[in-house]
Image (cartoon, helix red, strand yellow):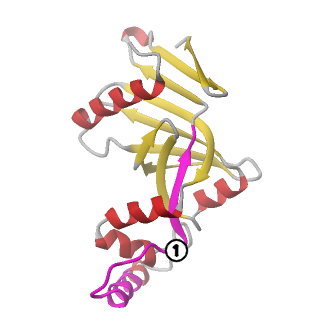
């Protein structure tokens, strides 16, 4: 058993990649706006390590607006096949342009074009409008690489608290929690 939350996360995440039938990197992202109104949605984890957990999005979306107002978030991984979950809480900061560029370049061309075509989180009058915008982007970038839109990029949640929850019989679950105190981690247990 490890006392390093990142080593434990790596082990659990590796097991999830083997057992989860779809998107083991799917994570619920919870934010709150300046008035404290919460919002939660699923995003995909695209990187992680001791410096934090990274996801990418349109920086003009609702989640980005929430993060501009209140730069703290919570993440929740739920791996049903393993009967486990991991909760992560901490401040959020944008990743560098270079890191965003590198990840954007790794996406499929259609995903890249979709990032240009979508006004994420804004009202859409009809699906045909979005499809027409997508076709416009196909024509605009025909025969060339698709650059990262200036309004699209990554965020990193720098954990100050990580909880590992393991299902046990009769709801006698195991909960291990790690709290960061400056650079050091304190480990403890929670009642189920």
Total numbered circles = 1
Q: In this view, does 108 lie to the left or right of 116?
A: left
Q: Is-magenta flag for residue 135? A: yes
Image quadrant containing the N terminus: top left
Span colored in magenta: 131-158
At 39% from the left and 65% from the top, the residue drawn is: 104
Question: Could you say whether the residue bearing mark 1 is in a helix, strand or loop?
Answer: loop
Residue 44, image x, y percentages: 41, 50
- The spot of residue 148 in percent (x, y) is 44, 72
| Residue under label 1 | 119
- Could you tell me residue 61's position as x and y percent? 57, 64
Label 1 neighbourhood size at 10 Å, few (<14), some (14-19), many (20+)? some
Residue at screen point 56% across, 71% down:
122
- Find residue 48 and report its image quarter: top left
Identify which residue, 117 or 10, lies in the foreground.
10
- What residue sits 57% from the left and 35% below the top? 159
Q: Where is residue 134 in the image (x, y as percent from the top left)?
A: 37, 81
Which is more toward the observer, 96 or 40? Answer: 96
Q: In this view, does 86 lie above or below 130?
A: above
Residue 157 lies in magenta, yes or no? yes
In the image, residue 22 above or below residue 56: above
Left or right of 167 in this view: 142: left
Considering only vertical position in the picture, is 101 above or below 56? below
Q: Residue furthest right?
A: 35
């Amino acid at each position: 058993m490890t006392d390093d939350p990142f080593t434990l996360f790596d082990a659990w995440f590796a097991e999830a990649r083997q057992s989860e039938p779809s998107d083991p990197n799917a994570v619920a992202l919870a934010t709150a706006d300046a008035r404290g109104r919460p919002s939660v949605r699923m995003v995909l984890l695209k990187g992680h390590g001791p410096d934090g957990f990274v996801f990418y999005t349109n920086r003009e979306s609702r989640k980005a607006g929430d993060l501009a107002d209140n730069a703290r978030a919570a993440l929740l991984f739920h791996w049903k096949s393993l009967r486990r979950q991991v909760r992560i809480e901490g401040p959020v900061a944008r990743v560098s342009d270079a890191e965003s560029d590198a990840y954007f370049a790794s996406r499929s061309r259609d995903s890249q074009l979709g990032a240009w075509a979508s006004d994420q989180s804004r009202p859409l009058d009809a699906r045909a409008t979005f499809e027409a915008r997508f076709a416009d982007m196909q024509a605009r970038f025909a025969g060339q690489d698709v650059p990262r839109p200036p309004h699209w990029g990554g965020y990193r949640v720098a954990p100050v608290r990580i909880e590992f929850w393991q299902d046990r019989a009769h709801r006698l679950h195991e909960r291990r929690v790690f709290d960061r105190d400056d650079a050091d981690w304190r480990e403890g247990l929670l009642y189920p």
